[in-house]
Amino acid sequence: MKSIQEIDDKQFIRELKQFDPKAQTLLVKHYGPYLRKIAMSYVKDEAAADDILQDCLVNAIQKIEQFSGESPLRAWLRRIVINTALMRIRSQKRKAEDFIDPTTDDFDAYGTRLEAPWPQFMNAEDLLTQKDLSKTVRKKIEELPEQFRIVLLLRDIEEMSTKEVASALDINEGTVKVRLHRARAALKQKLEPMLRGEAV
């Protein structure tokens, strides 16, 4: 069986639209791990991520004729897996708001967060030289409670608008803004040791 690198995109899409079993197997093999990783970032549960991945791949294969080719196949599949994850989250019973961390609520009378002075600050060049920076940021995002993590992923990673996020999660725009603000503040706090040049 040829790999995706050995066939051109148009041919691969054509074979998928003809429901070619070999092309479908190649789709699952090549994109499955990538899509599962995205699912895990939204649900943080392996069994749920596996269910989402399965639903995503079934939907993709069934709806491949709707794929216009205007965007890369990878981006189209990414959107399907995110939508599948969001549908699963919406179908679950709504949970009470989790508190991120009591220290994130320490503000002065002007709304500025209170924090200890920083003895040193890591500059952008130092941050860029850190090999594991992206991995560390991703890890800290995954530590956020679900409702805050998902809003942060949709707004800051997927670059969806506040209105789009509100619609996707079936909440109002004000709630999106509050959750995003809290998520960003909590993420900043989690990253502060690294920004100070300390161990994370």
Image (cartoon, grey):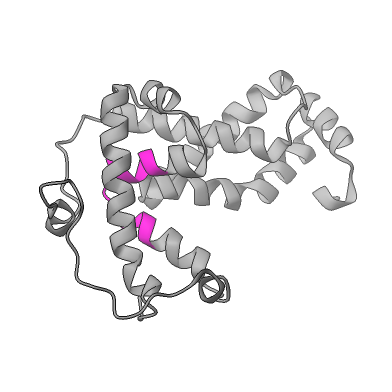
Residue 132 visible in image: yes
User: Quick check: is 143 in the magenta stretch?
Assistant: yes
The boundaries of the magenta stretch are 140-152
Residue 174 location in percent, x, y? 27, 26
Residue 19 location in percent, x, y? 76, 27
User: Residue visible at 16% across and 39% down?
Assistant: 97
User: Residue visible at 26% across and 45% down?
Assistant: 182
Q: Is residue 148 above or below residue 56?
A: below
Front-lying residue, 137 or 4: 137
Q: Is residue 181 above or below residue 143?
A: above
The reply, left or right, for residue 44 in relation to residue 56 is: left
The reply, left or right, for residue 165 in relation to residue 129 is: left
User: Residue visible at 18% across and 46% down?
Assistant: 111
Mostly what secondary structure, the magenta segment?
helix
Q: Is residue 182 above or below residue 198?
A: above
Quadrant in the rendering for residue 168: top left
Residue 178 location in percent, x, y? 26, 36
User: Quick check: is 88 in the magenta stretch?
Assistant: no
